[in-house]
Image (spheres, rainbow, N blue to C red):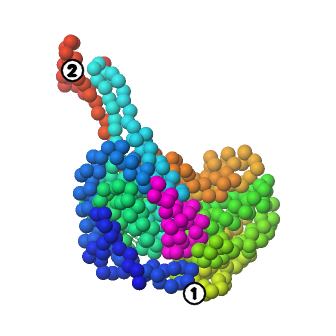
Amino acid sequence: MKTIEHWINGAATAAGSTRTAPVHDPATGAQQAAVLLAEPADVDSAVAAASKAFDSWGDSSLAQRTKVMFAFRELLVRHEDELARLISSEHGKVVDDARGEIVRGREVVEYACGIADALKGSFSDQVSRDVDVHNFRQPLGVVAGITPFNFPIMVPLWMHPIAIATGNTFVLKPSERDPSASAFVAELYAEAGLPEGVFNVVNGDKTAVDAILDHPDVAAVSFVGSTPVARYVHERATAGGKRVQALGGAKNHAVVLPDADLEFAADHLTAAAFGSAGQRCMAVSVGVAVGAAGDALVEVLERKAREVKVGPGQDPASDMGPVITRAARERVVAAVTQGAEQGATVVVDGRGVTVEGHEDGFFVGPTVLDRVTPDMAAYREEIFGPVLAIVRVDTVDEAIRVINDNPYGNGTAIFTAGGEAARRFQREVKVGMIGVNVPIPVPMSYYSFGGWKDSLIGDSPIHGPEGVRFYTRAKVVTTRWPHVTRSAEAAAFHFPTTG
Ligand code: NAD
């Protein structure tokens, strides 16, 4: 059986690791590989390699860094198909969906190709007599990324291209459930000409994460995953004086008004709820039907949910693959059962779905729960599976109130034909990313990604301009070259003022 190793100082290595975790093929339920789990000493080796590499990479020219990024981008294009299949085999998502996350992640590399523009400082001439001021930004040093299973290539790509293009060196701790994409990326970076030690991968679990959080030579930590772990990472790493960005879980609501095109809205809700088996941080997990939209919307959703073709991710006929683990499948099934017990109507029930020839796969079918109320567990908890809960309300104001009372605030959407409601919605809702007739409003790479409330711990969104700010710190320089032809200003004992 294949063993997935770490990537430290430009080469695959087992380092000192002996513990392993199984990596499954979720479509068959069978173990297909074992991933090494790093010990603190292995994290030390990766950080030491990154520290040494920073001596020269931190001093490299913008031209050298962008040359690597352009080459890396081309390699991601060339290997898109291979990478998409690799992701699908460990994650379970359909190959086209895996291709989608590669493309969206690649857009961050494209942003990093233009890092010279993003890093431009400013200059003020003659702020005082013979005095000028300019500012510029410098890299932090060794920075680390800790990432979730659901986007094994896109989420790490939100981090390392910007960190590396701004002159930092990087240690990635990907999800232990689907680690192979990160090993592949390490090889592509090497082929693109990135010097050894600039990008490192340590596979592992909580032991590796804690070693990163406590490491004195790690200057910053980027985390994406569930809210309890995001909170833990933020607390522990900031206690050690590190800069931290920590993105958490979600419960994304899509509001449907009676004036919306219901066929269009239901089509988008179905794709946004069940795509990737609901395992997206921007998946729509709650539909909020306003007034008369309710019965008609549920009727169309039921039809569309039944049409979703569940099957292995590698089969081009499948719309939706399995969930990531057997435990995840059991958790989703239990959440639906609890929802029914607490009074929700199970309109479409995916609990018993099996796929012929893949009876041991981690499949659960699209599920629609109607008449869910905010006090039910199926509403409050992030199920992270193909379950769409419908909450019925009477007015737009009530819909906004429901969303604002929810502890999460990652993404939300409104489906309507009217600008007045849409404008009010986007101004009043306490959510970071909003779609108007767009169900999954993931910002482009030249904006930044981040939710509000429990979906983002701390205050730092990811990638785009916020990413550049996160991975660099500013210096402001005040300069005077005393004028030879006129007497220099005398030093004063009072606090300097301009004149
Ligand atoms: P997770 O929190 O279980 O794991 C994320 C990372 O943390 C992994 O690398 C894992 O090894 C590590 N980890 C897990 N438990 C830990 C612990 N107790 N101590 C230290 N480290 C630990 O998340 P997941 O199940 O891999 O991913 C799904 C979650 O990620 C969902 O909650 C989803 O909403 C969220 N997510 C959020 C975003 C966003 O942008 N806000 C994006 C993608 C995923």
Q: Are circles 2 and 1 on residues that touch, CB within 8 Å? A: no
Residue at the far top: name it: 485
Range shown magenta: 73-102
- Nearer to us in this view, 117 or 412: 117
Q: Is residue 385 visible?
A: no
Q: Amino acid at mark 2?
A: Pro
* Mark carried by residue 360: 1
How many numbered discs, if any?
Answer: 2
Element on which disc 2 rests: loop
Residue indicated by mark 2:
482
Q: Which residue: 50% across, 66% down?
A: 83
On screen, residue 125 above or below 121: above
The image quarter in which residue 290 lies:
bottom right
Q: Nearer the viewer, residue 365 or 206?
A: 365
Front residue of this view, candidates 354 and 230: 354
Please, what is the three-letter code of the amino acid marked with disc 1? Asp
Query: Is residue 443 part of the magenta span, yes or no?
Result: no
Q: Residue at x 28, y 63 (%)?
A: 9
Which quadrant is home to the C terminus? top left
